[in-house]
Image: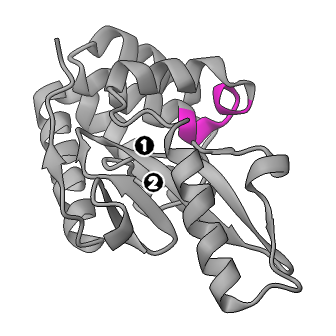
Amino acid sequence: MCKDFPELTCFGNYLVFKRFEFILSGIAIEKTGSGICFYKFMYPTFDIQQEVNLLYSERLGAEKYYLDITNLTAGIIEFELRRRIKMALNQIDKVVSLEDFIDVLNSREGLREHSHARMVCGLSLLLLNREDESELVFEEVKGTFHPSIAKDCLDFIDIAKRSPDEARKVLFTKDTAFKSKYKLTIEKVDTQP
């Protein structure tokens, strides 16, 4: 499928733009029992969790983007997938900066109230050298993590308090490991002014 969209690279059910810095942007495709849903996909490559999910994504409108595959042939499904992907690409920012991502995290109600999304907001601020703001976010979420990730998050917050530079190195390592894990072919772009 990706060969039809040279500006994208694919892994799993994700089609993402090749040019990015820290924030993947593209389309996620989710198969349900009788159809296929499309999402405006975003994901930070430095997320401590490291398992890709749709937390930061938005489902695209069902009228245009839901594909009921119940009575369709494989050829028609393939055609409709390509058509919907092409339509969706017009609605998606090709490059999402850390600042843009922070705006998304702070503007969507569900993300403002989600402890992991708040943690990632703090990580994003740290990458932008906004240590004071990131420390405030870390303090805000300290006791709210799911038990499965609490230790990793709290350990990272401790590192960030002791040495923001060391914490940034950890995030750069996470970013590199993520790209390697998913074998992403990336054309890096500088989104900083």
Q: Is residue 142 among what the camera can see?
A: no
Mark 1 residue element: helix
- In the picture of the structure, the residue carrying the numbered disc 2 is 151
* Numbered badge on residue 154: 1
Q: Position of residue 86 (x, y in %)?
A: 52, 53
Between residue 80 and residue 32, name the one nearer to us: 80
- Split into 4 quadrants, where in the image is the N terminus? bottom left
Res. 179 in view? yes
Q: What amino acid is labelled 2 in the image?
A: Lys
Q: Which residues are magenta?
A: 110-117
Residue 68, horizontal then vertical, whole percent: 84, 72
Q: Residues within 10 Å of mark 1 (few under 14, many from 20)?
A: some
Where residue 3 sits, quadrant-wise, is bottom left
Q: Position of residue 14 (x, y in %)?
A: 47, 64
Q: Measuring 61% from the left and 73% from the top, which residue is drawn there?
A: 79
- Is 133 positioned to the left or the right of 68 in the image? left
- Extreme-bottom residue of the structure: 73
Amino acid marked by disc 1: Leu
Which residue is painted at 49% across and 45% down in the image? 89
